[in-house]
Image: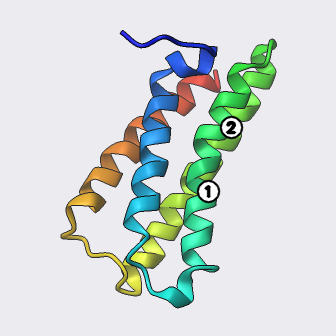
Amino acid sequence: MADYVFPFEKLEVWKLSKNFATKIYKNTENFPNEEKFGLVSQLRRAAVSVASNLAEGSSRKSKKDQAHFSQIAYSSLMEVLCQLEIARDIGYISENDDYIRGYSEFLEEIKKQCLIFQK
């Protein structure tokens, strides 16, 4: 059993989003060099934003503030989805890639949990 220092570390949605961001980092390493400051940077920042906003929101006292940060996390998640679609459309990733199917599962679960926190 893990020792938790901060409340957000107990949240399944935060754990999922942190793992998701790690996958994005690893899988964008093979993108073309000319995308380093373009699509790669955008994807990475948006993916990190999901986990970061969930962590920040969990520290807020009011439900309204918590819901606000969950909404920001959800919005960042939609940004990642858009960018993955673009990366697929321009041929950087393929529908057949295993990690794309894995992304779909991560995205769906994180989306569900973000929406729950917004209530």
In this rendering, the answer to whether 45 lies above or below 96 is above
In this rendering, the answer to whether 7 lies above or below 71 is above
Where's residue 118, x and y in %? 64, 26
User: Is 73 in front, or is 99?
Assistant: 99
Q: Which mark is residue 104?
A: none
Q: Which mark is residue 53?
A: 2
Residue at 39% from the left image edge and 82% from the top image edge: 89
Q: Quadrant of the C terminus?
A: top right
Q: Which residue is mark 1?
A: 46
Where's residue 77, x and y in %? 55, 50
Q: Residues within 10 Å of mark 2 (few under 14, many from 20)?
A: many
Residue at 81% from the left image edge and 13% from the top image edge: 62
Q: Secondary structure at mark 1?
A: helix
Q: Which quadrant of the view contains residue 105?
A: top left
Where's residue 115, x and y in %? 55, 31
Colour theme = rainbow
**Horizontal side of residue 15 vs 66, given as left or right:** left
